[in-house]
Amino acid sequence: MPKLPPRAKALSATAVLLTAALAACGDSGSDSSDGASPDQKLSWRDCPAPSAAEGGGTAPSPLPGGAEWQCATMKAPLDWDEPKGDTVDIALIRAKASGNENKRIGSLIFNFGGPGGSGITTLPAFGSDYAKLRTRYDLVSFDPRGVGRSAGVKCEDAEQLDAYYQQDATPDDDAERTELIDNVKKFNGECEKNSKKVLPHVRTTDAARDMDLMRQVLGDDKLYYFGISYGTELGGVYAHLFPKKVGRAVFDAVVDPTQTPEEGSLGQAEGFQLALDNFAKDCTSQEEDCPVGDSEQDVKDRIAGLLKDLDKKPLPALPPRELTQTAATNGIAQALYSKDFWPYLTQGLEDAYDGDGKILMVLSDSMNGRNEDGEYSNIQAANVAINCADDKPRYTADDVESKLPEFREASPLFGDYLAWGMVNCTDWAVDGQADHPDVSAAGAAPVLVIGNTGDPATPYEGARKMVDALGKGVGVELTYKGQGHGAYDSKNKCVRGAVDGYLLNGTVPKANTICS
């Protein structure tokens, strides 16, 4: 997300980690192939505390009413082309349905995006938001392969990552450009060194096959699915591979499946610029004076001036680390994922103008998966590994230089940053699979596709592209006129009514419904 948007198609779930932080201001798992079958029995137990790769912390608290979270491990083939070979352990979490067993539909599987986000940590964090859905479903999520406890990809250590995220990600001259390319090459080399065995097997098509195995192991004839952000791409790939197995599915914060990585990055530049414009408009339209600018343009000009100054002289932040231009841009982008974070952005900018970079640095750390103890989850490593295994194009520094004018036109603030993120797969050890995913799913059951007009990370236009790509009679589009990344967790009654009605009762909303 910048560093995941450069490295990501989309992000969804770092919000929970961020709120807590601000308040406080590998290899495959087994060599046995016998258990990787639909007949395997899951051993559900109380969940342990999240692993360091999942972000650390404490074991998930019970849901309102006392329902406990349970965890288990499913075995899947490491290489789906050799199903009798080595296996990989896929970590699962669930909360059992709260309603009458006779009305239980099955398991509702969630993927919250990234790619690289841990479902083991994210589902409990948002669990109370899905209380109504739990009346008829077991709520289930997982760490996709390469993520967290599911053979999590390992790249650089915490000390190396601190330095990596302090680097200048928008080079202005040959020396800075060489340094950036060298650092990316070193990061990618560490990924290969530490996770060579799993890197060829973390593609979205692999995760989709894992989900179909999961469906069978959980005892469902059809897949019931809620995909958010990158999770919409994963759901689309599943629908393409297993159209007849799609039950009821919802895609929220939709990735455009027709775009190349370059087109996706350019779309994000436009999306984040739109979100910044909306932030500036909101701040300056309040009755009280906006503390970070006198007009919409003044807000944006002052931010641009701050970033220019930081390129020359970073600010004190969280010793020994300073707020660099890269960290500030990253932190601003993180705050634009949700309107709930806009007050943090206002305070962070106000503090930075007074010489204090702490809040913007905390925002940046949240994006990068760094906790207060200085340890990193593997969200960035997994994000790079999955994207680079999926995406066939490889971009050079010269490619980026030629595209900079177009990116700068899309976003004066984020254009350079997102353009230079395209070099992240250049020296990757595994070839990418395709220019973009195939999500055509003729014959699949209806998929509810929700686009948010103010979404910075997965711009609204992607929802229509997903509907068209799924094929006639499959995608059903719903528009939410709102702000932030995603729609369901905005708690908008219209959106929630449509989603709950479909997942719980099978009621497909009218195509092109608009919620505001």
Image (cartoon, rainbow, N blue to C red):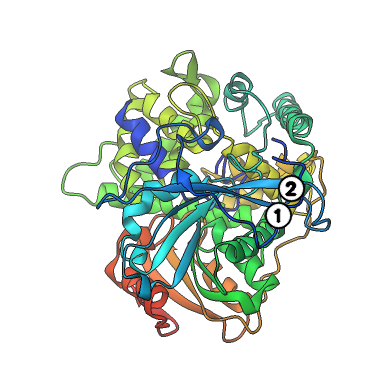
Q: Which quadrant of the view contains residue 6?
A: top right
Q: Residue at x 48, y 77 (%)?
A: 477
In the image, 53 versus 419, the foreground residue is 53
Residues tagged 2 and 1 counted as in contact (Cβ below 8 A)? yes
In the image, 194 versus 76, the foreground residue is 76
**Can the viewer see residue 321 in this picture?**
yes
Figure disc tally: 2
In the image, 51 versus 126, the foreground residue is 51
Q: Amino acid at mark 1?
A: Ala
Q: Residue at x 36, y 66 (%)?
A: 133
Q: Residues within 10 Å of mark 2 (few under 14, many from 20)?
A: many
> Is the residue 513 above or below the residue 59 in the image?
below
Q: Amino acid at mark 2?
A: Thr
Q: Position of residue 227 (x, y in %)?
A: 51, 62
Q: Which quadrant of the view contains residue 188?
A: top right
Q: Secondary structure at mark 2?
A: strand
Q: Position of residue 207 (x, y in %)?
A: 66, 56
Q: Residue at x 66, y 82 (%)?
A: 442
Q: Residue pushed farthest left?
A: 287
> Is the residue 258 above or below the residue 153 in the image?
below
Residue hosting label 1? 36
Q: Residue pushed farthest top?
A: 320
Q: Earlier in the sequence, mark 2 or mark 1?
A: 1
Q: Which mark is residue 173?
A: none
> Is the residue 130 above or below the residue 312 in the image?
below
Q: Residues within 10 Å of mark 1 (few under 14, many from 20)?
A: many
- Left or right, residue 63 beside residue 302: left
> Is the residue 25 above or below the residue 271 in the image?
above
**Can the viewer see residue 256 in this picture?**
no
Q: Residue at x 37, y 20 (%)?
A: 355
Quick one: quadrant of the N terminus? top right
Residue hosting label 2? 87
